[in-house]
Amino acid sequence: MAVGDGWADLIARLFDRLSEALAGEPQSTKIVIIDIKEKYGELRCEVLAPVGPETEAAIDQAILLAEMRSECTCDECGEPGRMRSTLGQSAWLAVKCDHHQSGYPRTVGERSPKRRITDRSGVFEVTYDRAADSVTEILIVDG
């Protein structure tokens, strides 16, 4: 796993939610976590899950919550943070709080708490609430 210590709680919550998602599946059902890493300052998680569509949706939501929380959580301490970058042509991105911004002097800006998701059931606009660590989904009707 290649993520900062500040995301330990975020990863623990992800694992709890993955376990909850599997609760409706047979006890022998296992998922494989292929990769958990930071990329472009955000959490990335890839799993292989031979499960039904309802469980797959719950797994996708658990991963989405973790990814969206990572966009506003300092990867060093877990406090609220903002996307920042190093200077120069080969800039690196990371989410840092004001205390841990050393080496990342430029604020990239506030990430929108909204994300558009497309899946088999339609297109959704998902809004993340950090305080509640939850999302609300609004179905966008395709024209």
Image: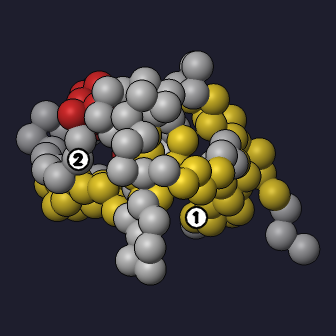
At horizontal 23% and vertical 47% (from top left) the residue drawn is 3
Q: Label for residue 91?
A: none
Between 13 and 143, the one nearer to me in the picture: 13
At horizontal 42% and vertical 51% (from top left) the residue drawn is 104
Q: What kind of residue is marked 1? A: Asp
User: What kind of element bears circle 2?
Assistant: loop
Q: What kind of residue is marked 2? A: Val
Where is residue 98 shown, x and y percent of the image?
Answer: 49, 31
Where is residue 97 shown, x and y percent of the image?
Answer: 46, 33
Between 135 and 58, the one nearer to me in the picture: 135
Residue found at the far right of this picture: 143
Q: Which residue is mark 1?
A: 119
Q: Is residue 100 left or right of residue 137?
A: left
Between 56 and 13, the one nearer to me in the picture: 13
Q: Is residue 103 visible?
A: yes
Where is residue 69 shown, x and y percent of the image?
Answer: 48, 37
At horizontal 29% and vertical 34% (from top left) the residue drawn is 76
Q: Quadrant of the C terminus?
A: bottom right
Q: Is residue 27 left or right of residue 50?
A: left
Query: Where, by quadrant of the figure, is residue 136 drawn?
Result: top right
Q: Is residue 23 visible?
A: no
User: What kind of element bears circle 1?
Assistant: strand
Where is residue 52 shown, x and y percent of the image?
Answer: 36, 53
The tag earlier along the polypeptide, 2 or 1, is 2
Residue 85's place in the image compared with 10, above or below, is: below
Query: Where, by quadrant of the figure, is residue 23 drawn?
Result: top left
Residue 85's place in the image compared with 14, above or below, is: below
Local packing at callout 2 (Cα closer than 10 Å; few below 14, some 14-19, many 20+) is some
Q: Which residue is mark 2?
A: 3
Which of the two marks, 2 or 1, is nearer to us in this view?
Answer: 2
